[in-house]
Amino acid sequence: MTGSLLQTKLQGNPKPKIIWFKNGALLRPTPRHVLTHSNQIATLKIHNIVAEDSGHYTMYAENPAGRIVSTAYLAVEPAGAAPPQSPAPQSVNGVSRPK
């Protein structure tokens, strides 16, 4: 695998401010970590993924109407290894999903 894509669909008026974290630390844009938000999709693209990219990723969105949080765990496995079992996605109270 050469990259990974994490996306969250959200809406808000005014447009929410989006902040990404990895393992609780602020994740800043770099040539490898590309952060975008358009058409109600917040996206984190990780290029040239390596084992050190494994971890808990959190997207935090806030505007005057409220805030939401979406989290995911990214596990980078060696080539040929069996993928780990993932828990089922869970709902987050207070999250407004576009219809």
Image (spheres, rainbow, N blue to C red):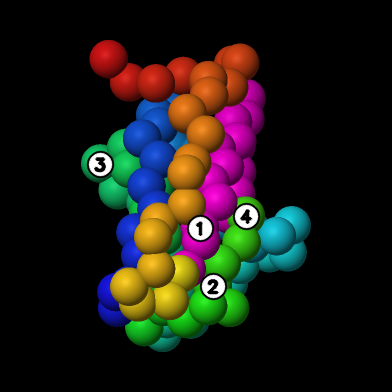
Instruction: Find residue 8 and name its label.
Output: none
Res 10 quadrant in image: top left
What whole-number distance in Å separates the C-alpha atoms at marks 2 and 4?
9 Å
Type of the residue with mark 2? Asp
Q: In the rendered image, which residue does mark 3 sit on?
A: 39
Left or right: 46 as drawn, with respect to 70: left
Residue ID for mark 4: 56
Identify the residue position indicated by label 1 in the image.
74
Name the amino acid type tagged 4. Answer: His
Question: Is label 3 or label 2 in front?
Answer: 2
4 inside magenta stretch: no
Mark 3 Cα within 10 Å, few/some/many (few <14, many 20+)? Answer: few
Gap between marks 3 and 2 measured at Cα: 26 Å
Name which quarter of the figure residue 23 lies in. bottom right
- Residue 19 seen in the current view: no
Q: Relative to 97, does residue 72 appear above or below in the rendering?
A: below
Instruction: State the residue at coordinates (47%, 81%).
Output: 50
Residue at horizontal 45%, vertical 69%?
77
Position of residue 8 measured from the top left corner of the image (x, y, whole percent): 40, 40
